[in-house]
Image (spheres, helix red, strand yellow):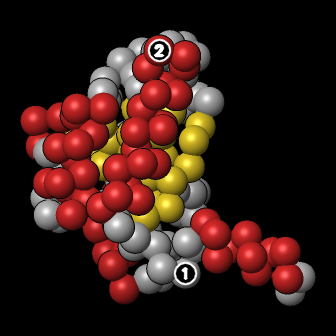
Amino acid sequence: MKHSVQKGLAKAGIRAAQKHIFVCIGPDCCSPKHEGEPLWKHIKDRLRDANVAAMRTKAGCFRICAGGPWVVIYPEGIWYGEVTCERFDKILQQHLIGGRPVTEWVVAQNPLRCPGHADDTPRRHLAMESNSQADSRSAPDASVQH
């Protein structure tokens, strides 16, 4: 592997990350200039200050196009809408550090699982139920909440 790739992987914190935070900064769900970008910078600063082992990825659109900015936290698959800097501070303390999602702000939950992985049982069960009329190899509907 090239040294530049190794350096990039280290900078992104991939090996140490315990969470992955995706942030939709608009343009249709919110104003990128007034809401999305300031939230992105705030998340970056707060994660660094709190020394949380999390990667973050900025997205231009989650295709929801309302109720943003959006934040999704994996591996739990917790979706938060209308996230402000103040809301993120509570999400940081309670969810990312404390391990308890801020339930009053959770809009959806969809933990992603790998087929055949030890923690895949709930998804495999849903896949078998939802695919009785479809190809059994297809994934269950992502809108199913757990």
Q: Secondary structure at mark 2?
A: helix
Q: Residues within 10 Å of mark 2 (few under 14, many from 20)?
A: few
The residue closer to the viewer here, 84 or 79, is 84
Q: Which mark is residue 66?
A: none
Extreme-front residue of the structure = 49
Callout 1 crowding tier (Cα within 10 Å): few <14, some 14–19, many ≥20: few
**Could you tell me which residue is drawn at 62 percent across and 30 percent down?**
60
Question: What residue would you read off at disc 2?
Answer: 34
Q: Position of residue 69 (x, y in %)?
A: 41, 26
* Residue sitting at the far right: 2
Q: In the image, is 144 to the left or to the right of 54? A: left
Q: Residue at 36% x, 18% y: name it.
A: 67
The amino acid sitting under disc 2 is His
Horizontal relation, residue 76 to residue 141: left or right: left
Residue appearing at x 43%, y 64% in the figure: 54
**Gap between marks 1 and 2 measured at Cα:** 33 Å
At x 35%, y 50%, the residue is: 46
In front: mark 1 or mark 2? 2
For this view, does 16 lie left or right of residue 6? left
Q: Compared to 86, does 94 lie above or below?
A: below
Task: Give residue 107's position: percent from left, percent from top.
Answer: 25, 34
* Res 117 seen here: yes
The number of numbered discs placed on residues in the rendered structure image is 2
Q: What is the quadrant of residue 10 in the picture?
A: bottom right
- Nearest the eye: 13 or 132: 13
Residue 137 position, x and y percent, is 58, 64
> Mark 1 highlights which residue?
15
Amino acid carrying label 1: it is: Arg
- The answer to whether residue 132 is seen in the rendering is no
When asked about the image quadrant of residue 105, the answer is: top left
Q: Nearer the viewer, residue 117 or 2?
A: 2
131 left or right of 100 in image: right
